Amino acid sequence: IFENAVGVPQGSFTTAFAQTPAVRRSIFDGVLGVDEYKKAYQNLLPVLNSLKDGITELEKEVLVLRTETQEYEELKWEKSELERDITSLLKEIQEIKSRIELLGAERDELARREEKIQQIEKELHKLKVLIETTEKDLKRVKNDLEEAESAENIVNELADKKKEYEENEQKLKDLYARREERNRCEKKALSLKNNIAILKEREKKCEELEKEILGLKREKEDLQPVVKEYKALQRETKSIQEELTEPLRELIFEKQSLEEVEKLVNELNNRLNKLKKEKNQLLPQLDRQNYLNKEIEEKIRLIGVIHSEVTELERRSEQTCEENLCPILHGIRCEAVTDFNTYFTEEISKREEKLKIVQKKLSELQRELESLKDPAGQISERETLIKEIEKQLKSDRLRSIPEKNNENKTKIYKLREKFKKYTTELTGNKNELKKIEEILIKLNKQIETLEDAKIRLYTIEKLTHTKREELEKLKETKEEKRRAEEELEKEKKKLSKYAGLNETIRIIENRTEKLRDAHNTYLQNSPIAARKPELISVQKKNQIKLEEEETKTKKLKEERQKEETHFNKTKLHELGSRLETLGKRLSARESTQVEKEKQFKTTEKKLEKTKTKLKELEKIEKQLKQEEKLHTYTTYIRDLLNNSGQLIIHQLIDQIATEATNTYCEIMQNYTTELHWNEDYEITLTENGQEHSYTQLSGGEQMSAALAIRLAILKTTSQIDIIFLDEPTTNLDTQRRENLARQLQNIHNFKQLIIITHDNTLSEQTNHTIHITKTNSESRATP
């Protein structure tokens, strides 16, 4: 719609209507939507094929499911038979279980009696063991009681000696405590003596330290002037390094960088001048290129028109030969001339000759254009480079070079004034750094010669501080010595109280040693004698226990005899055999039942699965019928689309022709004219009962008819109320251009009409004009 109605490209406004019917159909079928019916017809084919494939798949599924469900009745009969067999087995199993229950109760009663007899036997055996154990315990207790009575006699005899031994032990404990106190006093007195000897040594050390500190003080006073000179040289060296060497190095580097940038500026200026010169030399070639491009476009358009005319002549030649129609007066049969082949051959030959001339001229123009080597591209490339260079030259970095040069010189001057003592000339040369480094080397050598004095002074100060600290610690030595001597005298007085202590301890220890055996014998027999009351009590308890166990044994023997009268071992074995036979029979029936139930579950699952498949079969058969109905309906719709497209287009073309007639009459201000547009999209004009083909119309009439048709297409097929006209006065003479300008004022029902043109004829008729001017390959809009 946009390409053929809203914004028709320059030079092609009337071209489409002068083409052959096939070309016109290829253009306007798409605009009017004929292609949509064809596409809809073609697009439904995959849908139809898909439905066919779906129906085939569903038919296959129906066949498979019918095969899988054909055993349904047989499975129902098999399930019924299995239910009957399982019921019969369950009844038989219940009868066997009842018989087993009766026989089992009788066997359990006999087994219970047998178990009770065995339990009584075990109890009797346990009681026998207990009686034997109790008799042994009575014998052992009797022996222990005799031993306890003997131990009691010994304890009574040794009671006095035991008491004397314990009294001596307590005395020794007290004496040992006094001996510990005496030993502590002796140890403290010895420690005080040693401390006094150490304090005497420290007193002597104090005197030696005072003499050493005095000697170090004198040596320090001699070294201080040398160290002062050393520090002054260090400060001077640091000042030269930080305030002269480093700043000068930075200034020299900055100066070299500025010189390189100045060199770059000169190179950019030279390159800029060269590019501008080359651009000016290419300007004449650019004008020639623009001229050649226009000529080539005109020749290509002319070739298209000639091709269309030749095709139309060939078509009319065929039509004329068949119907003997007049080639000049269209639609009128000529009776005077019967053969128009010569006329059409000459007309076609003229156009072919004209076509060769135009094609030859086109080739010459194209060769000349190629020989120019695209001056517009070369100028654009140079303009881009010129802008980049000018941008670089206008940058703050390059514009500030002179100012930075002056700053650099000022800084160098200040350094020269500050360090006149070492250097009288500073210009920023790299060699000046070497001279300053030589000065630093000399100063460092002087510092090295004075460094030993500094180290020695530091050592003396540290040594003096250490000795003073040591002397400070030793100041209290005399007072400590006095206090230690006084404390030693006190300890000697305490020791006088412990005279004869060792002899007293030795006498008591000898007497205690003689009583030790008697004391030990007493201690060994005392626990045994203490057990006598307990042993008497145990003896009585064991005698009572033995009587109870004998009574219990008698009762159990009577109970065993009673149980044995009601017990039959042979009958118990018979019942066991009968129960075992019934158990095997029950197990066989239960196994058969389990197997039948498994078969029943399997059959039931198969039956359920078959039922599910039957439901699925019913569902798929229903779906198959729906798909077949849809296939029939889709086939009908597709055939309808195939036949309806052309009928709808006939109606649309009639509407467009009617609308175009109204627009054409308004443009031409002639309401006796009727515009027609046939199925081949050919324009014909009927005026005063006479029909004219499109090729017979004048250039203005062709432009007006084409404009009317395109506007009618736009109104009929869309809601767009804006249109662009690109060079609508092409190939029109002055009179026709003026007529078209007046005719455009008569177009109604459009909100906006935009005309793109180089022709000033139309500018007077517009409400608003925008001029596009091109300066240095850049287009700008001005109101």
Image (cartoon, rainbow, N blue to C red):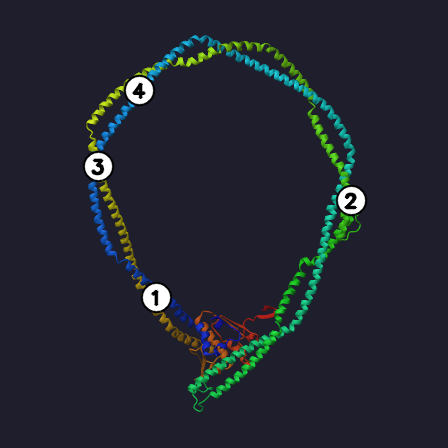
Eye-nearest disc, 1 or 3: 3
- Quick one: label 3, few (<14), some, or many (20+) residues within 10 Å? few
For mark 2, what is the residue? 442
| Nearest to N terminus: mark 4 or mark 3 | 4
Quarter of the image for the C terminus: give it.
Answer: bottom right
Q: Mark number for residue 692?
A: none
The amino acid type of the residue labelled 2 equals Lys
- Quick one: label 2, few (<14), some, or many (20+) residues within 10 Å? few
For mark 3, what is the residue? 577
Front in this rendered view, residue 549 or 372: 549
Q: Distance between the residues labelled 2 and 4?
A: 121 Å
| Nearest to N terminus: mark 2 or mark 3 | 2
Q: Distance between the residues labelled 4 and 3?
A: 43 Å
Q: Residue at x 23, y 50 (%)?
A: 82
| Nearest to N terminus: mark 1 or mark 3 | 1
Taking the image as shown, residue 306 lies to the left or right of residue 542, namely right
Residue 296 appears in the rendering: yes
Q: Mark number for residue 52?
A: 1
- Quick one: label 4, few (<14), some, or many (20+) residues within 10 Å? few
The amino acid type of the residue labelled 1 equals Lys
Q: Where is residue 638 in the image (x, y as percent from the top left)?
A: 36, 70
Taking the image as shown, residue 181 lies to the left or right of residue 618, namely right
Q: How far apart are marks 2 and 3 (CA)?
A: 130 Å
**Does dot 2 land on a helix, a strand or a loop?**
helix
Q: Position of residue 12 (x, y in %)?
A: 51, 75
The amino acid type of the residue labelled 3 equals Ser
Eye-nearest disc, 4 or 1: 4
For mark 4, what is the residue? 132
Q: Position of residue 93 (x, y in %)?
A: 21, 43
Residue 630 sits above or below residue 763 on the image: above
| Nearest to N terminus: mark 1 or mark 2 | 1
Q: Where is residue 58 in the image (x, y as percent from the top left)?
A: 32, 62
